[in-house]
Amino acid sequence: MMEPRHSHDLRIVPVPYGHPDATKLIADVQQVYVDLYAVEDATPMNPEECMSPNWRAAAGTRG
């Protein structure tokens, strides 16, 4: 069994929309939609919409 990690092990860093961690999180959220509603969200998404200075994304890593 793994030892529990403490919050001081967590690093939160800004990432762009196309970053692998952001892509994985988006795919995981899409799977939740499939599990709940039996259909994937088909709303078109333009990654350029997430390039504005007002848009922020973050990824957390441990270690």
Image (cartoon, helix red, strand yellow):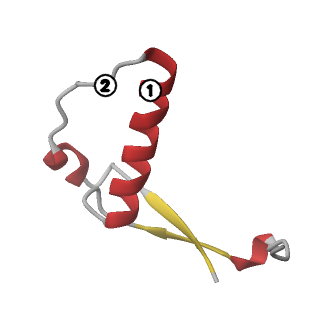
In the displayed structure image, the side of residue 32 where residue 47 appears, left or right: left
The number of numbered discs placed on residues in the rendered structure image is 2
Q: Nearer the viewer, residue 55 or 16?
A: 16
Q: Secondary structure at mark 2?
A: loop
Q: Which residue is mark 2?
A: 41
- The residue most toward the front is 1
In percent of width and height, residue 12 lies at 56, 69
Circle 1 residues within 10 Å: few <14, some 14–19, many ≥20: some
In the displayed structure image, the side of residue 42 where residue 39 appears, left or right: right
- The residue most toward the top is 37
- Quadrant housing residue 61: bottom right
Give the spatial CA distance, label 2 vs label 1. 7 Å
In the displayed structure image, the side of residue 53 where residue 10 appears, left or right: right
In percent of width and height, residue 55 lies at 33, 49
Q: Which residue is mark 1?
A: 33
Circle 2 residues within 10 Å: few <14, some 14–19, many ≥20: few
What residue type is disc 2 on?
Asp
- The residue most toward the bottom is 63
What residue is drawn where x is 17% and y is 29%? Answer: 44
- Pointers 2 and 1 in contact (C-beta within 8 Å): yes
Q: Secondary structure at mark 1?
A: helix
